[in-house]
């Protein structure tokens, strides 16, 4: 069984989830990073090669952190996404591999011609 974090603290002001592990390691993961690396079917797809590149998630926040048994949490994001579970092993992996995963994500965005910035559409009142 993987290690269980000793603390999860969400800093709403800078949208960062701080995870403290029993060995003293602390990972600070942005809500955006967690959102685009969700293991949900919406992000990963239902099979090999069906992943959907998440874009426009810069500034996304976390509305709730819900325990799921003793092995994971469900993160509820303020863009409505709430179907991904983050088990302790995966959260640790996201922390340890942060730089590699983040750079790969930025590269995927560039190749796809997408951006991290949310797309806003201005509505004109008639």
Image: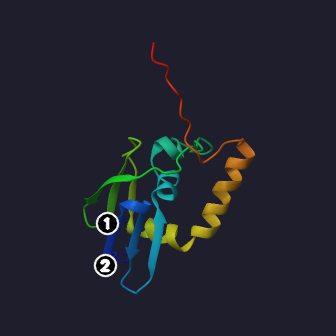
Q: Dot 1, how many residues are within 10 Å of its Cα: few (below 14), some (14-19), or many (20+)?
A: some
Q: Nearer the viewer, residue 28 or 87?
A: 28
Indicate the secondary structure of the residue bearing disc 2: loop
Is 8 above or below relative to 42?
below
On the picture, is 114 further left or further right than 63?
Answer: right
Q: Are marks 1 and 2 in contact (CB under 8 Å)?
A: no
Q: Residue at x 37, y 54 (%)?
A: 62
Q: Dot 2, how many residues are within 10 Å of its Cα: few (below 14), some (14-19), or many (20+)?
A: few
Quarter location, residue 86: bottom left
Q: Residue at x 74, y 46 (%)?
A: 111
- The residue carrying mark 2 is 6
List the single residue furthest toward the front.
126
Q: Nearer the viewer, residue 68 or 103?
A: 103
Q: Nearer the viewer, residue 12 or 6?
A: 12
Q: CA distance from mark 1 to mark 2?
A: 13 Å
Q: Quadrant of the C terminus?
A: top left
Indicate the secondary structure of the residue bearing disc 1: loop
Quarter location, residue 3: bottom left
Is 118 above or below relative to 84?
above
Q: Residue 71 bears which disc, if any? A: 1
Q: Quadrant of the N terminus?
A: bottom left
N-terminal label among 1 and 2: 2
Quarter location, residue 81: top left
Q: Residue at x 39, y 68 (%)?
A: 88
- Where's residue 113, x and y in %? 72, 41
């Amino acid at each position: 069984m993987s290690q269980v974090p000793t603390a999860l603290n969400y800093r709403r002001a800078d949208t960062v989830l701080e995870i403290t592990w029993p060995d003293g390691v602390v990972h600070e993961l942005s809500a955006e990073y967690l959102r685009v690396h969700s293991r949900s079917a919406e992000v990963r797809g239902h099979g090999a090669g069906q992943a959907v590149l998440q874009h426009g998630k810069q500034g996304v926040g976390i509305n709730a952190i819900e325990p799921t048994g003793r092995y994971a949490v469900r993160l509820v994001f303020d863009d409505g996404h709430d179907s991904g579970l983050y088990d302790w092993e995966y959260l640790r992996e996201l922390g340890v591999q942060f730089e590699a995963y983040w750079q790969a994500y930025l590269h995927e965005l560039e190749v796809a011609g997408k951006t991290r910035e949310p797309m806003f559409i201005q509505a004109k009142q008639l």
